[in-house]
Image (cartoon, grey):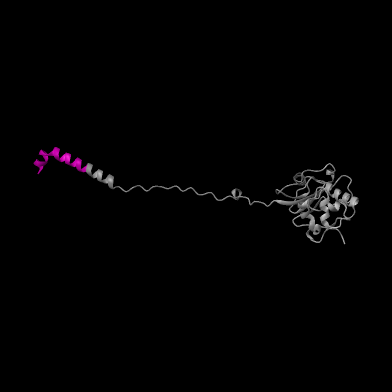
Amino acid sequence: MTEWVERNRGFVLVTLINLAALGALLFWFQRPEPTSIQILTPEPAPSLANEPTPTQAPLRVYVAGAVMRPDVYRLAPGSIIQDAIMAAGGATSEADLDQINLAQELRDQQRVYLPRVGQANAPPPVTGGESLPAEDANPTATVDLNTATVEELETLPGIGPGLAQRIVDCRVANGPFSTIEEIKTVDGIGDATFDRIKDRITVGN
């Protein structure tokens, strides 16, 4: 046996080397796959600052008095009296801006009245808010075309100082109105304006 090994030493050595290489190769292919490490990044907590802000409803403000276009206007939240006057076409040449705080912030359903220079017993510059004033909420609160003053006529929607004065002038020149429809004979009052004020006017008994 020893003699055979001595004679075939080279063959045996090569065989052992091949077996070792084969074993290493089998071990390489059969080794377990390394476990992958997954790094999880925590999701950021929701921030209230990034949440959308609910859309605020516009302010509904009635602008009357010495403005170019008295009417109800929709204004952005945070608007001030100056914004309301500008929405109504701006102040007339008769407006007394010193009697009103243009920087006052408005609330929904307020009434803004811009007085004229020298006007006596003018309504408060700002009334109401969040709910209509009692006189506006009362459907029976009407204005008598035959006895109303210019200031009282200006409380009607769409009637500014110019129209109010023409109504009084028409009444003085032609006598009392017989029906509320006769107000359409006043220059500047058409069917659209009449439809807006017809429930608020009367000619008395």
Residue found at the very far top of the displayed protein? 10
Q: Does the stretch in magenta take in 161?
A: no
Measuring from the top left, give residue 107's x and y in whole percent. Answer: 74, 52
Task: Examine the residues drawn in magenta and state their main secondary structure.
Answer: helix
Q: Quadrant of the N terminus?
A: top left
Q: 50 or 193: nearer the eye?
A: 193
Q: Is residue 128 above or below residue 27?
A: below
Q: Quadrant of the C terminus?
A: bottom right
Q: Which residues are magenta?
A: 1-20
Q: 54 or 110: nearer the eye?
A: 110
Measuring from the top left, give residue 73's x and y in whole percent. Answer: 74, 49
Measuring from the top left, give residue 41's x and y in whole percent. Answer: 48, 47
Residue at image coords 83%, 53%: 183
Judged left or right of residue 6, residue 159 is right
For residue 154, say whether it is visible.
no
Q: Does the stretch in magenta take in 11?
A: yes
- Residue 137, by quadrant, is bottom right
Residue at image coords 83%, 54%: 182
Q: 15 or 65: nearer the eye?
A: 65
Residue at image coords 79%, 57%: 198
Judged left or right of residue 14, residue 130 is right
Measuring from the top left, give residue 157's x and y in whole percent. Answer: 79, 52
For residue 167, say whether it is visible.
yes
Q: How many marks?
A: 0
